[in-house]
Amino acid sequence: MYARRRPTTMKKSTTACCPPADPTPPVPADEGEANERLAALAKAIAHPARIAILRLLVRHEGCIVGDLVDELPLAQSTVSQHLKQLKQAGLIRGEVDGPRVCYCIEPGMVALFKALVEAL
């Protein structure tokens, strides 16, 4: 569904463009809190474009927004909106590097999401 517009032009990051990862948050002991946390994370990834963005970020260990736009059949403003939702959920982190913004996966939150799903 989200085929590339052109051949892959993204370069694998040779230097970390994002700050160090946050520690993995603990799985909430309270079932109600765990349900809320899982629902919020599931909502954040409940769009094929956001899944595609996460896959690209995992594959390339961080990306500049322009690189993501080149890879996805979406307008830059749409990609930015999806990035905003993923960042608000804590699944990605971004670092401003001059005129560029580099996004990376937040591995601790991905691990938390996996743990919450496994606890179902």
Image: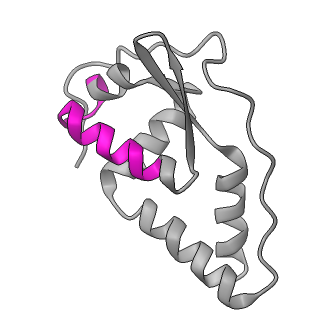
> Is residue 70 toward the left or the right of residue 67 in the image?
left
Which color scheme did the rendering employ for the protein?
A: one colour
Along the line of sight, the residue nearer the viewer: 118 or 100: 100
Spot occupied by residue 87 in the image (x, y as percentages of width and height): 50, 47
Looking at the picture, does residue 9 appear above or below residue 86? above
> Is residue 27 toward the left or the right of residue 120 in the image?
right
The residue at the point 45 percent across, 22 percent down is: 101
The residue at the point 71 percent across, 56 percent down is: 111
Residue 94 on the magenta segment: no
Looking at the picture, does residue 73 appear above or below residue 51? above
Spot occupied by residue 67 in the image (x, y as percentages of width and height): 36, 20
Residue 76 on the magenta segment: yes
Majority SS type along the magenta span: helix
Spot occupied by residue 72 in the image (x, y as percentages of width and height): 27, 34
Which region of the structure is painted magenta?
70-86
Quadrant in the picture for residue 44: bottom left
Q: How many marks?
A: 0
Quadrant in the picture for residue 64: top left
> Is residue 118 toward the left or the right of residue 93 in the image?
right
Image quarter of the C terminus:
bottom right
Along the line of sight, the residue nearer the viewer: 7 or 48: 48
> Is residue 81 toward the left or the right of residue 120 in the image?
left
The residue at the point 33 percent across, 59 percent down is: 47
Looking at the picture, does residue 26 appear above or below residue 19? below
Spot occupied by residue 28 in the image (x, y as percentages of width and height): 77, 76
